[in-house]
Image (cartoon, rainbow, N blue to C red):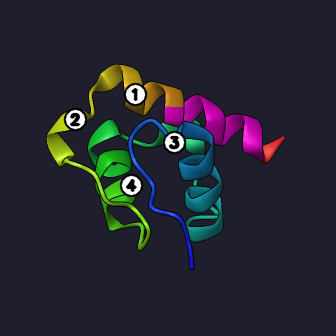
Amino acid sequence: MARTLRWTDVNDIAIALDEAHPDVDVLSIRFTDLHRWVMDLPDFKDDPERSGEKILEAIQMAWLEERK
């Protein structure tokens, strides 16, 4: 059974996003799209209102690191 992802699981979210969207240019993604993609992850279960620019930026940077 997969573990439930929350906004604080930045690195795990980045890995899941990389698997779901392998061809995306991580630095060009809009935060509105990033937020929607996180919400669409099958294991993600958290309040959509609990995210903000700081969390989305952390996810984006973790995703960029995942690509290296």
x, y (%) of residue 15? 65, 54
Looking at the image, which residue is at 27% across and 51% down?
46
Q: Quadrant of residue 57?
A: top left
Question: Label 1 amino acid?
Answer: Ile
- Can you identify the residue that label 3 sits on? 9
Q: Name the mark nearer the viewer: 3 or 4.
A: 3
Task: Tell me, yes or no, whether the highlighted magenta stretch contains residue 63.
Answer: yes
Please tell me which of labels 2 and 3 falls first in the chain: 3
Discs 1, 2 touching: Cβ within 8 Å:
yes
The residues tagged by marks 3 and 4 sit, at their Cα atoms, a distance apart of 11 Å
Mark 1 or mark 2: which comes first in sequence? 2
What percent of the width, then of the height, locates residue 43?
44, 68
- Pick whichever of labels 3 and 1 is earlier in the sequence: 3
Instruction: Indicate yes or no whether the magenta region holds residue 27.
Output: no
Query: Which residue was labeled with disc 1?
Result: 55
Q: CA distance from mark 4 to mark 2?
A: 12 Å
**Label 2 SS:** helix
Q: Amino acid at mark 2?
A: Arg
14, above or below 24, in the image:
above
Instruction: Locate the C terminus and report the quarter of the image it occupies.
Output: top right
**Farthest right residue in view:** 68
Q: From which residue to which does the magenta span run?
A: 59-66
Residue denoted by label 2: 50
Label 1 vs label 2, nearer the camera: 2
The residue under label 4 is 38
